Each structure stands twice: as C-alpha cells, then as structure tokens.
Image (spheres, coloured by chain):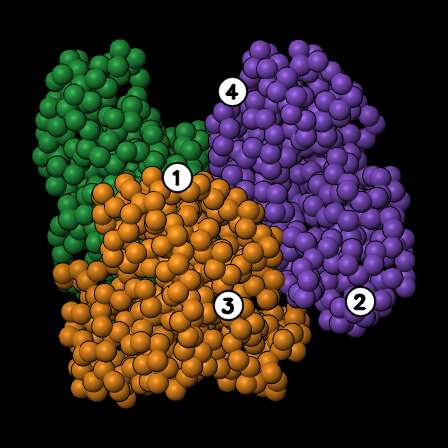
Chain colours: A green, B orange, C purple
C-alpha cells in the first residue's frame, strides 16, 4: 500500500478475464500487420501508422531490445529474429498477469491453448467457452431440428464441465445485435428456426436461435461474457450498444453475472447498466491497446464515472500477437493509475481507497466472479 | 467580479431548477444506502463503494463534523446521531441555493414539502407539477374515456394555478421513450387509448396518452421539464436520447420553453438541440453528484461545447438524502469553475465573460425562464 | 521538423477539403449574427453569447485591429467599416490554406465562387459537386420519370467534368438519414419514385432516390463526401450517426473513397468505420469552430483515439462568414498540436512521428485523396 498509485498498480498481478491465444508460428510482415488491425492490412498504408502501431513501437520495441519508437521495419526484423516462442514469452511475462481467462472459440490462426499461454506467461489460465462455437459444432455434427435445443444444451453443459472452464461467452452483438426480442423463445420457435438454419447452413445468425443461446447461457449458471461495442468490420457498431439489451437484463436480474466486454464507444451506457443492475459488470478491453497508454485513461475515466467499484474489470481481449496481452495490461495500468492518482492529488479520493479500487478492478472483482484461487488475500 | 472564477462561483447563490424533497425521517443504514444509488442496495456490496459514495465520504462527512474520507460506518452513525432535521438543515444550507424548484410528483418516501425544504434551507422554493401524476390521479378518481382529455386538461390547469407553481414536468422518457409519433393525437385516439388504459389500469404508459400529455403540457404555457438520459433501472437509456425528440421539438418551436433534464450520456445531443431550437435548454443534473466533483467538469465541458450560454441551467435532481442537494451544487460549482477558469487561463475567455456565464448558468437563466424574483440584479 | 509541434503545425499550409464560399456583401448585424449560428438569431439573445461567439471575439477581433475579447458591438462596427472584401481577405489569408475544396451546391446568400475564394485567400481552390443540387436541377428542368435515372447520371457526369472538380458530396444524412436500405435500387423502383417526386415537387427526400443518388455517386469514381452528425435544425441528429451506414459501406468496399464530414458527436463511431473499412475517412469540421480552439483538442482527441493516421483530414465547413474559414483552421491547428505535443511530452509518440502525423492530417491525406498538386513533397 505504500508508494504512489502507479507503483501499486504496476506491482499488482492482474486477472485478464477475457483474452485469446497468441499465434504459435513465426509471422511474416504481412501476417503480423494484418493481426495489428481490427480492419485488414491495406496496400500502401502501414498498420503501424495508427495509434496501436505507435504504441507497439514505443512500448513493445524495448522488450525486443530495441530503442523506444523503433522503426516498423526494425521491429519486424527483430521479432522474426527472436522467433515466436521467445517473443510470446517476453510479452506474456511482461503483462504480469496471474490468471488469463481464454476464449477458445475463435482461432483462425494456430494459437496457444490456455495451458500453452499459461506456460509461456508463467501464469495460470482458465477457459471461456464461446457458445456460438458450441452451437455451430452441434449443427455441423448433424442433429434434427426438433433435437437442436436439447442437443445444444447438452453440448454446452458438457463443454462447461471441462476442467478449468470458468465462464461462457456470446457474440450475439455480432450476429443479430442487441436489439432483439428479450423473451425466451418457445421450443416450437427454436425447432422451426433450427430447421431453417440447417437448411441454409452457415453461421448461427437467426434471431430466435441467438435468443435461445442467451437463455441457455443463463441456465448454465456460469458468468456470461457478452461482446459489446468495438470489434471488427463484421459488426454493426450501433447494434452493439449494450443499452439495447436493457429488457433482457431486466428479465435476467438475479441470475448469472453478465460481463459486458469492450463496450467502447458505449462505455457510459455500459456503466449505466452496471449501476442499475446488480448482475451487470463491464470492462473496456480491446479499446485499451487500440487507443494506447496515452489515451487509455480518458476512456477509463468515462467508464468509471458512475460505475460501482465492484463492477469494473480488466481484460485485454488480446488475440494473435502477444504484444496485445502486454499492451492491454500496460494501457490499463497507466490509465487506471492516472485516473486514480489525479483524484488522490485533488483530494477527491483517499490513497487507501485508491489502492483498494485498483486491486478490485485489476484483480479482485474477477477473482470473486470467476471463483479464482486467492494466493494473496486481496481486498475482498 | 473580483477574485478567481472559483471564488465568484462559490459565492453565487444558485437556482436549483429541478429537485425533490429530502426525507423527513431518520434513515437506518439500509434505507440510506438504497437512497444513495440509482439501482438498489445489493447484498455484500456497499453503495459507498462507488463514485457517489466516495464523494459523500469526502465532501459530506466534514459537514457532519467528521474527517474527510470518513469510513461509511462512522458516517452512518454520525448521521443517525444528529437526526434528520439537523442533517437536512446542514446540507440544504451548505448548498447555498436561493430557490429550489421542487418536483412534487415523485415521493415514495415521506419527504419535505417545498415549504419544508425552503425552511430547512433558508431559501425560497417553487413547485414543479409532474403531469403523469396528475393524469394518473384523474384516472384513479374515475372518469369515462370520453371525458379523459378534458378532465386531464382541467386537472392540469388547476394544478398549475396553485401558488408557487412555475413549471410542469413529464417523464415520457421513462414511459415510452422519446421515439414517439410527434403529432398531436386526435380526440378519438385519446378517447380510445384512455378506454384501454382504464380497463388495464396501472401507470400511464400508452404512447397516444403520453403524446397527449406532452401536447397538453404545451397548452399550459409554462416551462416544460423533460427527463432525458440517466435515471434508474426503470429506463431504457437509449430511448431517452433527446435527439429522438427532434420532430416534436420542431413542431413545438415558438411555444413553451423546454428544459431537458440530466441528459447524460447524451449531453452533446441535448447541446445540439439547445443550439438549433430557440425553446430548448438543458442541464446535466443528477449526473453531477453521481460522477462527483472530480469528474463533473468533464461532463459539463461536453455539455458546454456548443451550447449558447443562455441555454444551460443548474439542477441537482436530488431526491431523498439532502447530501445530494449539497453535492449536486458542489459538483456543479467545482466543475463549472474549473471549465471556465481553464479557458480564462488559456486566454480563450475573458474573466468578465466567465463571471457572466457562471451567473447565467447557475442562476440567471433559471430566474428568467421561471420568472423568479430578482433580489440581486444579476447579469440579465 | 525543428521546433515544437505547435510551431510546425502553425507553419503548415492546410488543405481545407470541405468548405463553402464567403458572403460577397456587407452584412448588417442581424444577418451577420444569423450566419454565426447553426440555429437562427433569437430575439433578446446575442449569438455572440456562445462558444463560437466568444471565439470570434477572441481570435477574429485582432485581425480586424481590435483588442482580444472585443465587445460584440465594436466587432460588428469595425467589420462594417472595413467592408466585406477586406474582411474576407484578412480572414482567408490568415487561415493559411493552400487549397480550398468548395461545395458549390449550397448558397442561399451571394457567396464567393471557388475562384473568388482562391483569389481572396491567395490560394488554390477546387470544386465539390453536391449531388442533391444536380438531381433537383434535373427535376426542375423537366424530365419524365422513366428518364430520370439516366438524366441524373448524365448531369452528374457532366458536372464532375467541369475543370477543378475533385469530389462529389451528398447530404443524404439530412434527407433520409443513414438508416436506409443499403441495396442499389432497381430501375423500376427509381422510375416509380421519380414519378412520385415529380408529382409532389420539392426537395429530393425519397429514400429510393437518395439511395440511387449514393449509388450513382459511386459510379462517378470520385471521392464521395458525406455529411454526418452536426448540422442545423433541419437534421435529425441520431439519424446522421455514420454507424447506421455500415451495411452500405460494406457493399461499397473497394470503390470510391468515402469522406465522413463533421461527425460530431459521433466522431468515435466514424473513427471505428475508418479503422475497419479501407475506403472510409473522416474529419471533425464544423464542430471545430463551434467548440472553439479551447475545446477542439478534446474533440480531436476522441476522433484520433483509434483512427489510422492516413484517415483523418481537415475541413472547416465554413459557410458565409470568412471568420469561420480562419477559426476552423486555428481551432484545428491548436487542437491537433495540443493532442500531439501532449503525447510527445509523455514520450508516447516521437517528435518525428508527430510532425509526420500533423502533415498527413492537415494536408497530405487530402492531397493524396483528391489528387492535388504537390509543391512541397510532404510526407507521402
């Protein structure tokens, strides 16, 4: 508890409650640059010419033994020289995370398993089951429409019984957006929709089945992570405004914890929901490394305007390049410490409270929600 | 006019143009904590662990003779020891408000009347008539559907003739949201909707009747306060975006002043409306004490980006605990002074202009709109 | 490259990629004040009592040989005394713009032609063709419904062949909002809609014809400027949220550059689109002078949170009073330099990168997109 808020936050091991694996292969420049953006690599424009690219050159280069602000070409060359194992190891350890909760349902590249991530990081890892992947596997392996509801439920129950699973996740925001009928669909509705889906094929995008997935999630009695706000070009951003989910949140009050992920630019809307609904929590993951450490405090300050201190968590939402596991943590630490120190300096907050809030946000809220082991007693 | 902007703003008596009464009973810890949140008290999580809770411990504790940042338990004990009369008196006087405009239509607890609030504060008080309460009283006392429109109009006219009434208010944002048909409904539509409402019972939520209420409000020729944005869990936040009201505002141009209350997180949308429609005004009440004095400036700065200086007002929207009447005023003063002083320091604004803008925002705009008496000539 | 970021930015000639002409007549106080607002002049309230009014008194008064923060009356008197030619000349030169791209399709007042603006400014000017004006001219000159599609296409092609035309523009956001069917309408749909329009008369507001206009724009193979967000009272702000355009942007990927203009308060939504779609770019014009130099940095900082550095441009969107051509440039320079210098000071960004980003944003991105001549090699 001694030291500035920044020193305390820098020393705090985090729980990264939502991330993905790091690629387990050497990446040529084009593949690395594609992973650096939520868009894609565009001819003639370097993905390094962006806030996240600048942040990588500033904060990741030194971990590869380069100067701060090293040129992109030097960065890519040195990364290749070190090889993916060493690169992953350096960034994952630098993140200083005690537990990664890993969404294993999205992996277009070969990436580390939770165990592989844990080993490289010298940390613990748990698993988050992406329910759309479970549903799509059920559809792929063949089931008749009338059997879909129970087959999906059984598959989801089986998936969450795997050792280390601590939560489920849905990307309903991508598939239909949050402006859906909040009611639990009937068995007949689900069967009819499943029939149409199986005939059509492809991803689960039917609104009835997305609703059914969300209600099935509730029945699993694990924390439910929901993508909200910022993502890639597959999204309609305005339909991922979590305020659109209000009626469903009202119906599910008293059930499982709901974790709104990312949320940017709707962090204030998410904060409102976390303030009025007991089961709602939020983070501003993904946005943190995209805006970089220089701007993370501004985004966090909005997320923290009214949010009760037990409701905000840390995640990186890093995928693919281990730079992001590190940069997410760094942006979070700098941003959070900045916001809290400023309030301490203005005597709006006591130093003791600031330290408690930092530990809750960076670690203890996640420990409690996911039932993670407590080596250090924390502030609960 | 001498002194820093902060000194000037601290010395300025405010008009709190929208608030509620303070509870006239001693509050046990659970009831106090429930009043502290826009949500409800949640088991195992103290409402003090929130920005507003921290602000109460920082800024209200000293008024109860405690140390800054006093622990929650000590705060509750001292509050009980002093008793509600003394607590209300201290906070209401500390707010340094010359006139409270009190919404008397929402009072699930026993709270001060406008006169009681005025007496405790050593201030003046006026009344704001909540039209939904008037309409629901008309429905409760029994009227046939065909007589509803004229009975409601007559009851509203009678209500606003009471001494001290300066405005009417609607919570249409809660009942239907602002995305409603802007047109004035016909008599036949109102009668049909009233028949359905009387058969169904409960609160006024029918979209035709909500529209009718808004148009009846216009006919009363008093300023109309509209809840917008931030509120409790009964709201769908995105439907309370005041931009959704644009067509209705266009139709009512040239009629009564419209006061958009709260607005957060849509303060920029409200600012746009206040910039392009002569009759539209706004405040960021309620949000100010929820975010606390450390963040009020950031919210006000957004609200003030383009808003003409005669269009922004102060309200606390305090309900129940007199801490909020004080904390709203304090957050407003600190936030406003901070925004204005920063511009003066950057030579973007003259000190004379800053003082004038402060007086308009904190007092004179409300005096003019509500026809309040002017003891000090102000800057009009 | 030597000097502070601010010195570099102050010395940089800008490309103002979207503006209008300046009035070519002396303006009495009432007409000047009406041009100062996006609303209209309101009796009893001076348009100078607003952020933009304060900024004019602070930053434009000295260019008319007055003191900083000169009173409004003195400002108006001195402006009248100098006459419109001298006033335009002073402000347009002070803007230090190398090229103005002028929207010639909106001119309720007598305003400078692009050539006249260029001459007064000692700069270059290009033209932006407003497609709604082209379509409405086609309708006015008489064409049968079956011939509308080809007549509009031919007129648009002819318009963009005029010397100096570098882009087209649409105000679809005003006419229908962006929540329209993204699909290209069929010939039969267009013909039917044109028949209804010709029978009804008035402005082009039919959703089928607005869609047809946007798709015709794509076929012209020039950059397409789209009004988004902030404007006058003719707008429904929430329908001008550029995120609503996502499906159309997905369909038009790989075609013409799309430039989202203004965007406030949806600059983060626009930034998301520019981050995930290769052809999308943005600016925060119009908002910059309305918020003034003291707040422009805050708006730009949001616009720059995730936006790739090749995707942000400068425009003033000045119309009517040449104060805005100057104030837009000044607000942009101060805001941008502030954001970049802060990051350099925090060692989040190298000075070299900051200078490169400034030149891209203020000039080089526009040069490249519009094919403007390069006297100074810039940073491409």
Check disc 4 and report the residue beneath it. Answer: C183
Left or right: where does residue A6 sit relative to residue C323? left
- In this orientation, which residue lies closer to the viewer: A106 or B264? B264
CA gap, disc 1 and disc 3: 36 Å
Question: Which numbered circle lies on residue C75?
Answer: 2
Is tag 2's residue or tag 4's residue first in the polypeptide sequence? 2
- The spot of residue C273 in percent (x, y) is 51, 36
Q: Which residue is mark 1?
A: B189
Secondary-structure class at tag 2: helix
Tags 2 and 4 touching, CB below 8 Å: no
Q: CA distance from mark 2 to mark 1?
A: 54 Å
Indicate left or right for B187 with A74 as reference: left
Foreground disc of the pair 2, 1: 1
Between residue A257 and residue A87, name the one nearer to us.
Answer: A257
Q: Return the residue nearer the eye: C107 or A77.
A: C107
Does residue A73 show up?
A: no
Pinpoint the chain carrying mark 4: C
Front label number (1 vs 3): 1
Question: What residue is rendered at 31% in x and 69% in y?
Answer: B319
User: Residue B134: horizontal and vertical position, in percent?
Assistant: 33, 59
Q: Measure how far apart labels 4 and 3 are at the Cα level.
A: 45 Å
Asked if the residues shown at circle 4 and circle 3 are in contact, with their CB atoms under 8 angstroms apart, the answer is: no
Which residue carries the number 3 mark?
B313
Could you tell me if the residues under marks 4 and 1 are in contact, i.e. CB atoms within 8 Å?
no
On the same chain, marks 2 and 3? The answer is: no
Alpha-carbon span between mark 2 and mark 4: 51 Å
Front in this rendered view, residue A87 or C116? C116
């Amino acid at each position: 508890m001694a030291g500035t808020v920044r020193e305390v936050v820098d020393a705090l091991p985090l729980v990264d409650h939502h991330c993905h694996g790091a690629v387990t292969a050497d990446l040529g420049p084009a593949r690395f640059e594609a992973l650096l953006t939520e868009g894609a690599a565009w001819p003639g424009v370097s993905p390094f010419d962006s806030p996240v690219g600048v942040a990588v050159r500033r904060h990741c280069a030194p971990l590869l033994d380069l100067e701060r602000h090293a040129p992109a070409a030097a960065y890519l060359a040195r990364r290749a020289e070190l090889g993916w194992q060493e690169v992953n190891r350096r960034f994952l350890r630098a993140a200083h995370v005690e537990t990664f909760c890993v969404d294993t349902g999205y992996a277009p590249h070969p990436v580390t398993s939770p165990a592989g991530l844990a080993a490289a990081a010298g940390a613990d890892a748990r698993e988050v089951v992406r329910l759309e992947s479970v549903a799509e596997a059920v559809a792929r392996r063949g089931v008749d429409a009338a059997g879909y509801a129970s087959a999906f439920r059984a598959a989801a129950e089986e998936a969450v019984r795997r050792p280390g699973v601590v939560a489920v996740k849905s990307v309903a925001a991508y598939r239909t957006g949050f402006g859906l009928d909040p009611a639990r669909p009937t068995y007949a509705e689900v069967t009819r929709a499943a029939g149409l889906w199986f005939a059509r094929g492809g991803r689960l995008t039917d609104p009835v089945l997305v609703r059914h997935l969300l209600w099935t999630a509730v029945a699993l009695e694990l924390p439910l992570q929901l993508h909200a706000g910022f993502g890639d070009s597959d999204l309609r951003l305005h339909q991922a405004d979590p305020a659109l989910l209000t009626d469903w949140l009202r119906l599910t009050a008293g059930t499982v914890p709901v974790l709104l992920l990312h949320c940017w630019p709707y962090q204030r809307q998410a904060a409102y929901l976390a303030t009025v609904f007991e089961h709602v929590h939020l983070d501003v993951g993904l946005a943190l490394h995209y805006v970089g450490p220089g701007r993370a405090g501004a985004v966090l300050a909005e997320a923290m305007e009214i949010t009760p201190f037990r409701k905000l968590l840390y995640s990186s939402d890093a995928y693919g390049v281990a730079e992001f596991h590190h940069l997410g943590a760094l942006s979070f630490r700098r941003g959070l410490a900045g916001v809290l120190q400023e309030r301490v300096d203005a005597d709006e907050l006591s130093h003791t409270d600031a330290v408690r809030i930092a530990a809750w946000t960076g670690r203890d809220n996640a420990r409690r929600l996911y039932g993670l082991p407590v080596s250090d007693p924390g502030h609960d």
